[in-house]
Image (cartoon, rainbow, N blue to C red):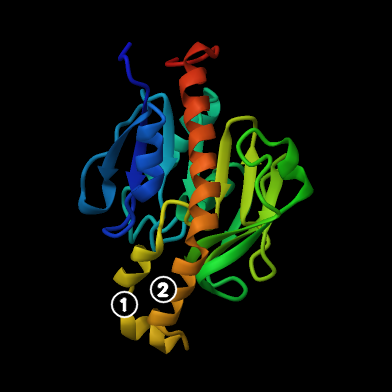
Amino acid sequence: MPETPRVLAVQNGANGGPGRFGEWLDAAGVAVDVVTAFDGSPLPTRLEHDGLIVLGGGYLPDDDDKAPWLPSARVLVEQALARSAPFFGICLGGQMLASVGGGKVQGEAGAPEHGSTSITMRAEAADDVVFRGLPAAVPAIENHIDAVTALPPDAVWLAETERCPYQAFRLGERAWGVQFHPEAGPERIRRWDVEHTRRRGLDLDELYASAVADDPLSRAAWREVASRFAALVKDGRSWPGHGA
């Protein structure tokens, strides 16, 4: 067994890397192996890492024609759930967890969310090993028009916004899905397409300035979440079914 616990991160878009979430995991003693699936890099057929992260991307979880690696990614999610390996899904990754778990995801559902957005914690978050004790509302960068419209059976709903209710949830004891981007700092907004943003009635400079103002609270909260997830990855090596 390697000395350093390792998680596999599936990257679904050129600008959708693990960002600061990966840096926080590394600082907490968990290495992140990124597979850039969007450029044709093959995903493993078997999850042999200590945990799994599926990152964001401009697809629905079943957009197999547009993103032919998605079936392989779904298999890895299923394997993580089956063996209780810690899983964290971000945006598309969170939607994939909902879909695999029996929930529903819809394209262009509700009002879109772009830029730094206040995420409201629900009462259920108080008992969650990853989300407990966070401030009542924490800003995070959003950039989506698709959304989870029904949670899987038995999922625990952890956080919400008015425009997109299902912002965070837990499935089982060790799998989390979020609609927002805890891995993205304000600098990520600078890479967004200016004209595309303007067509949505938004100003990139204003979005960036707002994210910068919100970043101290955002960074502190999501770093804590990453650290708690890292602790689960390290503790998970002693769980029944590890590596099975």
Check disc 1 and report its element: helix, strand or loop: loop
**In this view, 184 is above or below 21:** below
Q: What residue is drawn where x is 44% and y is 42%?
A: 74
Please state the horizontal and vertical placement of residue 11, each as a whole percent of the image: 32, 48
Q: Quadrant of the C terminus?
A: top left
Residue at the limit of the structure toward the left, as seen here: 40
Residue at the spot of label 1: 193
Identify the mark at residue 203; answer none if there is no mark: none
Check disc 2 and report its element: helix, strand or loop: helix
Q: Can residue 70 be seen by looking at this rendering?
A: no
Q: Quadrant of residue 150?
A: bottom right
Q: CA distance from mark 1 to mark 2?
A: 13 Å
**In this view, 149 is above or below 155:** below
Residue at the spot of label 2: 208
Camera-near label (1 vs 2) is 2
Please state the horizontal and vertical placement of residue 189, each as a whole percent of the image: 37, 69
Q: Amino acid at mark 2?
A: Tyr
**Tally of marks:** 2
**In this view, 228 is above or below 113:** above
Q: Amino acid at mark 1?
A: Asp
Label 1: how many Cα within 10 Å (few below 14, some 14–19, many 20+): few
Please state the horizontal and vertical placement of residue 56, each as a whole percent of the image: 41, 55
Is residue 9 found left or right of 83 in the rendered image? Answer: left
Is residue 155 found left or right of 148 in the rendered image? Answer: right
In this orientation, which residue lies closer to the viewer: 201 or 56?
Answer: 201
Q: What residue is drawn where x is 42% and y is 51%?
A: 183
Is residue 87 found left or right of 199 in the rendered image? Answer: right
